[in-house]
Image (cartoon, grey):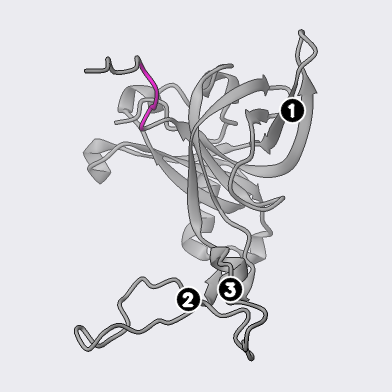
Amino acid sequence: MNQHPGTIGRKVGMTQIFNADGTVDRVTIIEAPTVVVGKRTMEKDGYSALILGLDERKEKHTKKPAAGMYKKAGVTPKRVLRELRCSEEFAAGFEIGKKLPIDQIFEVGQIVDVQGVTRGRGFSGVFRRWHMAGSVMTHGSHEYKRHGGSIGTNMTPGRTLPGLKMPGHHGDKVRTALNIKIVRIMPETDMLLIDGAVPGTENGIVMVRGAVKKMGGKPKAKK
């Protein structure tokens, strides 16, 4: 189990920061004023987790069961709720109804995974969706310049195989960027600066958690 579950936040946008040696890094700003709304315990639920809330919501728009949970926690209703699993020892260090301090969750230089929903682009053709080259523009080509080519097969199997790259719904998918470094932590404003780009649109909800599959290591010796 990941001992540092992370937090949820809102992608503010991208900017650049200057290092001491004069180089410039492009970073993504993530705002994470997250509140601990509740907890899951092994004794009651069979697993251990923190229930985190983000962004205010009007009480009249909150369902009754959720309103009772917020009232018990002593916090205002939240627009976004996420459960992040962790060990019981880790969850015991945070109090229900209090803000989750990001400087106690992460540290500068830590490798994390960032998950978000990609920008939705509607129904797109094969040029935009799969970066295909299309057909020739001359030599008798007629109304077939932006097509993806044949989708058929031979007599066997005699059908279009599943998974073929064709026009369709583009974007609006949950994607995870792995092994990204935290460049800076600003606890006074609840902001994280993460190296490079992350999935999602501006003001989109993202989940930042400790890296699960850490890449890298010593290179293998050549035989």
Q: Which residue is mark 1?
A: 189
- At horizontal 72% and vertical 31% (from top left) the residue drawn is 26
Label ID, residue 134? 3
Task: Name the residue type under label 1.
Answer: Thr
Label ID, residue 166? 2
- At horizontal 60% and vertical 31% (from top left) the residue drawn is 99
Report helix, strand or loop for mark 2.
Answer: loop
168 or 91, nearer to the observer: 168
Q: Which quarter of the image is occupied by the N terminus?
A: top left
- Direction from residue 22 to residue 50 in the image, left or right: left
Report helix, strand or loop for mark 1.
Answer: loop
Which image quadrant for residue 109?
top right
Graded by Cα atoms within 10 Å as few (under 14), some (14 to 19) or many (20 or more), the crowding at tag 2 reads some
Judge whether residue 81 is colored magenta: no
Q: Main secondary structure of the magenta part?
A: loop
Q: Which residues are magenta?
A: 213-217
Closer to the N terminus: mark 1 or mark 2?
A: 2
Label ID, residue 68? none
Closer to the N terminus: mark 3 or mark 2?
A: 3
Task: Name the residue type under label 3.
Answer: Gly
Can the viewer see residue 33? yes
